[in-house]
Amino acid sequence: MRHQTILHIFIILFSLLFSACSSKSKFMQQDRLQAEGKYSEAVKFAQEHIDIDDKSDIDSLLWELYLGQSQFFNNDFNGSIRTFDEAETRMKYHRESILATSIAQGIKSTLTNDNIRPYIGNAYDGIMLNTYKALAYLQKKDYSSARVEFNRALDRQRRAKEFFYASVQKEQEALNKEQADNNTSAPVPESVQESEYQGVINRHYPEMNLYKVYPDFVNPMTNYLSALFALANSDSSKAEFLLKQTAAMLPDNMAVQSEYQELAQTQSEENVWLIYEEGLAPVLDEMRVDFPAWIFTNQVNYVSIALPRMIERQGALDYLSIRDGNETLTQTQLLSSMERVMQTEFKKHYPRIMKRAVMSSISKAVMQNVANDSNNNLAAFVTTVYAIVSTQADTRIWTALPKNFHLAKFKKEERQSIDIYTPYNQKIASLDLIPAKHTLIYVKIPTLAHKVHISIFSLGETP
């Protein structure tokens, strides 16, 4: 009977480990399908993993982000909008649940494995969600709905700071109560904690200190695209404000700077813009580090913690050339780095991630000490195995986003078509231009070896 009990415990504990490993494997399979341009297969695969009826399902939000994006690049704009609508609802539910959580409930959610916490979405997830919805509405020529989505994306950037600080306060209250209830040492000043966290980062994750970050919770591409939309729909004051804001974020970007300087001229001419999604967004991997627990408690000296590490991935083509016959009209320039947007937010959240990992491991270590002192071999065994199996980093992230966004602009004049070339003088597309004053060509190339996606549509109703 005792052996059956131990076997049953083993099954439960290791199911936690393999469940997390299985989820990551499935997410990366979805990532591969999208990177290869197999959007129909990606749609079906993502749909199989969404629990529509359970708003609290821990992974469904991330699956909905993958699904909505796959539908968008599979030219199913109605399906993409519906999916992203559902993702917004689920994201709102998760965030409201966090702020409504009592301190007692907060302790449980803060100190358990991050993998069993719901994926609530990053600020950049929501911003890109609304950006893709706006683009989908533009392709449907529903300009009023596109305006709503651009406004939502911009408002989401503003509200992200409010949610961040409210959730930080809620989490800190839970951690303080856990520390008091465990009868550990006196609360440690925040400055001491931050010093220790920074020391761990410097030793084990030095590249984080090299991240060149943007302003918190802002995506320059969304600001720029919103400015173009405002320009195309006769809202020149908003276009000027957004371009000025984008230019301030990207002071070395000559394309954006000249766009801002030539705003009045741009309004009176027929122009074509090309935005190019290039490469693959970062992934998260796990690293194990030892952390000095004695700064929090007198019951254990060191704990082993699992932390996520952001791993950069490859780009695709450095630029695209746009030609009219034998004439090269222009070539794309780097607009902004989605990778940098993700790094900015990840770095912002990292002290909280580390704090949760430390306090969770301390809680498990204290539990092990109590079990060992009780002379109950089974209890000691179970708590030890639980501590080992449940120490995992949360590596969930929307990996199908691009590494970078690139930009090109040219005057339409009398042109009826253009050709798009790689830096290696290979033609990847011939494209007929459309009758519109302000035209956008949207290109996605995740890797050099796989399918190129290109669409063309009007930015507004202005004839």
Image (tube, rainbow, N blue to C red):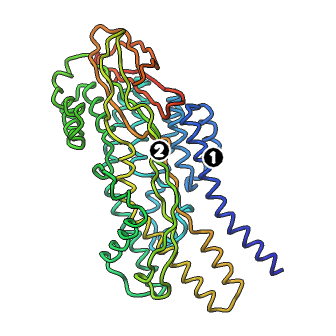
- What is the secondary structure assignment of the residue under circle 2? loop
Q: Three-letter amino acid code at disc 1? A: His
Q: Which residue is painted at 38% across and 38% down in the image?
A: 404
40 up-or-down from 57: above or below: above
Quadrant that contains the N terminus: bottom right
Disc 2 residue type (three-letter): Arg
Which residue is depicted at the point 58% across and 46% down?
28
Q: Position of residue 189 (x, y in %)?
A: 32, 79
Q: CA distance from mark 1 to mark 2?
A: 25 Å
**Residue 47, percent from left and from top:** 62, 41
Please identify the quadrant where the C terminus is shown.
top left
For label 1, the residue is 49
Disc marking residue 378:
none
Quarter residue 278 falls in: top left
SS at badge 1: loop
Total marks in image? 2
Task: Say whether residue 249 is left or right of residue 401.
Answer: left
In this figure, which residue is indicated by the disc labeled 2? 313
Q: Residue at x 27, y 25 (%)?
A: 233
Say above or below: 85 vs 420: below
In the picture, measured across the screen, residue 439 lies left or right of residue 112, that is left
